[in-house]
Image (cartoon, rainbow, N blue to C red):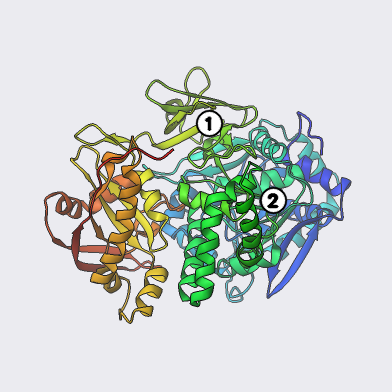
Amino acid sequence: MTINANSTFPRLLLEHGTAHPDHPAFREKDLGIWQTWNWQQVNAEVRALACGLVAQGFQRGMHLAIIGDNRPRLYWAMMAAQCLGGIPVPLYQDAPAADMAYVLENAEIAFAVAENQEQVDKLLDIKQHYAGIQHICFEDERGMRHYHQPELSSYAALQELGRTYDREHPDFFLQQIELGQPEDTAVMLYTSGTTGKPKGVCQSHRSFMTAGQGGVHFDKLQQQEDILSYLPMAWVGDHLFSFAQALVAGFTVNCPESSETVMTDLREVGPTYYFAPPRVFENILTNVMIRMEDAGAIKRGLFHHYMEVARRAGADILDDKKVPLSDRLQYWLGEILIYGPLKNVLGLSRVRVAYTAGAAIGPDLFRFYRSIGVNLKQLYGSTETCAYVCLQPDGKIKFDSVGEAAPGVEVRLADNGEVLVKSAAMLTGYYKRPDATAEVMDDKGYFHTGDAGLFDQEGHLKIIDRAADVGKLNHGDMFAPNYIENKLKFFPFIKEAVAFGNGRDYVCAFINIDMEAVGNWSERRGIAYSGYTDLAAKPETYQLIISCIEKVNADLAGEALMSGTQIHRFLILHKELDPDDDELTRTRKVRRNFISQKYAVLIDALYSGKRSQYIETQVKFEDGRQGTVSADLHISDVKTFAPRQQAA
């Protein structure tokens, strides 16, 4: 589709409804059955909802909160708000009411579309303290029979109200779309709040359309693509892939039945275009390794043999590089026996392009997927840049870089190594925060990302870490905690890691074990345990994690810049780091400053030579109650290695 300079997302919606009305636009699995809506039907659904909102008093410039899992009707709510000149504000559906309250009040929300009873309950709870919420529309009517609050209305009832309004004002809807301009704010996405309160990032139609067009052209995406939309709608990555690119290219957005059925639905959809943050790819790999540990000796032997072949030649074959004939033949056999069946089980058989972003991905994890023939690539961006800064061209993939500057994007490094970005795909500002906007935008129009990076000889950007997190050990070596943590998380037994070392003599770490992987490993060895805290404290668990960390240290010893940052001591935390306990953001990024303060006594114990440390920790439960988890944590030393020259 040709997109002109005056396009907005509502205009693209109308064009798809006219140009290819019968093409599948959205699918959703409900009660085990896939339902499909074509572009003509989506146009009618959005029109009815938009007119219903107007009938309730929604006006141009107002904000519409959208809360729930990925559902076609919630995407249509975003479109409906945009058609009216309103601004959709998606919220993280797993956030507790207290966290949502800040965003709702900051964004001055009067209208909200919620998925189900759970989200409605949160809004009604918040309404007791923030009276600004005037209208709540619920999409799923189950459990809502006995709710009689006047501000509530069902999605179906709101659309029926809209159809009546549309019949009485037949020209209104199209007139509102014509009033929209490319520079109007199309969406407001809140930052994850890694270092403070979340900020509302205002993005225009032009900015997200620029990012959408750039990605579609870069990867030659077609209308025939299928994408599985399961990541939070409040995350910039989902908005780029499942909304902006979907409307630019006109491909099909598939919504799973629930978060529990994502992997099953992934296999049924067989997407051609796939996007997931590193933690999802980590979880998939963990499940693969668990299953292989339970497999028979012959199957396990074949798997490890052909995975070694894949590690040696798979990525080069995918990039169409020269590979010895013997390796090509072995890889061909591996495709028949191992890689093909594995991709089929994972639902990745049809994937033509796969992306990961949101956090740095470990080179080993990256190599695994490309080695089995999945065209996994990294992109680099942020909420403020529409997740559109760097992309990796086919055939030029490097495991330790995020690629080259995307088309139309200028990337340069400040004197201190901070990555600076200038493009048309950038925020117009933080909502009600001109001071914060001025902090990140300089007088030359560059956005200061806060990330530390460097360019290699071919112009590929390498992200070292968050600039604020990069430090130095006392002996002068650079300390990049995220780099170390990603190496640790490659192992299926390690779910999360937090490294410490800035201003210290050596590096120490907190470890979260992966309950499923370590539990499976323990059960096969007859090791009994009663729960996470008990399993984490087992001597056998510590020996397992020591073996993983020693492999990381051996790897770091071969890297000139990182050999001095090997891990000397560690402990396994007695609880999993949790967004509800403010230890992680909703996108599962580590909140380092908070963790350093909360667990200061453990950090002191690591560096004072103690062998154990008792701690009591407050935790929040899903129902809002608070409790305490306590344990006497063991602290273990780890073998380190002399620096060595990395093999060429």
Q: Position of residue 634 (x, y in %)?
A: 19, 64
Q: Local crowd at mark 1 within 10 Å, few (<14), some, or many (≥20)?
A: many
Dot 1: element: loop
Query: From mark 2 to mark 1, how far is it between C-alphas?
Result: 23 Å
- The residue under label 1 is 460
Q: Earlier in the sequence, mark 2 or mark 1?
A: 2
Residue drawn at x 18%, y 40% is 505
Residue drawn at x 71%, y 49% is 80
Q: Where is residue 496 in the image (x, y as percent from the top left)?
A: 37, 57
Residue drawn at x 47%, y 76% is 294
Q: Position of residue 552 (x, y in %)?
A: 34, 51
Residue 352: which disc?
2
Q: Which of 300 and 108 is in front in this view?
A: 300
- Residue type at mark 1 is His
Q: Local crowd at mark 2 within 10 Å, few (<14), some, or many (≥20)?
A: some
Q: Which quadrant is home to the N terminus?
A: top right
Report the side of 291 relative to 256 (left or right).
left
Q: Which of 299 and 545 is in front in this view?
A: 299
Q: Which quadrant is home to the C terminus?
A: top left
Q: Position of residue 620 (x, y in %)?
A: 34, 64
- Residue type at mark 2 is Arg
The answer, for residue 110, to whether it is visible in the render is no
Answer with the quarter of the image where residue 578 lies.
bottom left
Report the side of 381 relative to 241 (left or right).
left
Dot 2: element: loop
